[in-house]
């Protein structure tokens, strides 16, 4: 049974609470995105930031061929063991095998993203899942509010992907430790 908290015309269903979810995703929540590859990060003076490679156009449009979306976890509602288990499953860097990397963003910041016409760009939905790791009631996803991928709009999609990535500014290991460069990346693309 889906209960509606509030409706939003640009993001229909966003304020719904799907069966199995604790609630709709609130503006005051923090969401987590796993960073499985070092190439999804850029080095800056203060450490590392997420880049647009962490969010594919197809995931943000919910059009991925495997029906994947830009998966998130709801930070305050997800037990630490679940975060760790799912982060380790997602991780693709040998150097982060025991302490994977994640990034956090405020839901309100994602929902505040606007396009050049002033329209809201990002929707954040509750999306409980059942997968090979078991049930995850606190799974969520972020998607674009208006478009499906269009080859003519490559620049618009690049800008949107970068905007979403920028909001995930708290990058660290699952343990809370400052981010380290994975040993496997030192010989390759790491700065």
Image: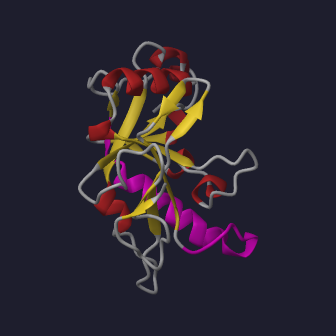
Q: Position of residue 45 (x, y in %)?
A: 28, 42
Residue 114: name its quadrant.
bottom left
Q: Left or right? Give the position of 174 relative to 188.
A: left
- Closer to the camera in the image, 68 or 164: 68
Q: Position of residue 57 (x, y in %)?
A: 63, 57
Residue 78: name its quadrant.
top left
Name the residue at 36% across, 23% down. Answer: 180
Q: How is the image coloured?
A: secondary structure
Name the residue at 57% across, 34% down. Answer: 130
- Closer to the camera in the image, 39 or 90: 90
Whether residue 103 appears in this view of the structure is: yes
Q: Position of residue 108 (x, y in %)?
A: 29, 62
Question: Start and end of the magenta stretch?
Answer: 146-171
- Viewport quadrant of the C terminus: top left
- Closer to the camera in the image, 73 or 106: 73
Secondary structure mainly formed by the magenta segment: helix
Name the residue at 48% across, 66% down. Answer: 13
Residue 162 among magenta residues: yes
Whether residue 91 appears in this view of the structure is: no
- Closer to the camera in the image, 41 or 151: 151
Q: Left or right? Give the position of 86 relative to 57.
A: left
């Amino acid at each position: 049974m889906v209960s509606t908290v509030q409706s939003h015309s640009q993001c229909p269903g966003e304020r719904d609470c799907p069966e199995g979810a604790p609630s709709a995703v609130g503006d005051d929540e923090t969401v987590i995105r796993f960073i499985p590859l070092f190439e999804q990060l850029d080095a800056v003076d203060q450490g590392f930031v997420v880049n647009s490679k962490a969010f594919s156009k197809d995931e943000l449009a919910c059009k991925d061929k495997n029906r994947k979306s830009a998966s998130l976890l709801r930070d305050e509602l997800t037990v630490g063991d679940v975060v760790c288990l799912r982060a380790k499953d997602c991780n693709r860097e040998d150097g982060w095998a025991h302490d994977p990397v994640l990034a956090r963003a405020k839901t309100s910041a994602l929902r505040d993203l606007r396009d050049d016409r002033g329209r809201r760009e990002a929707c954040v939905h509750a999306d409980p899942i059942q997968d090979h790791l078991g049930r995850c009631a606190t799974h969520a996803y972020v998607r674009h509010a208006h478009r499906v991928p269009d080859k003519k709009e490559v620049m618009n999609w690049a800008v949107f992907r970068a905007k979403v990535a920028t909001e995930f500014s708290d990058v660290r290991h699952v343990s809370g430790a400052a981010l380290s460069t994975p040993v496997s990346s030192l010989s390759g693309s790491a700065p």
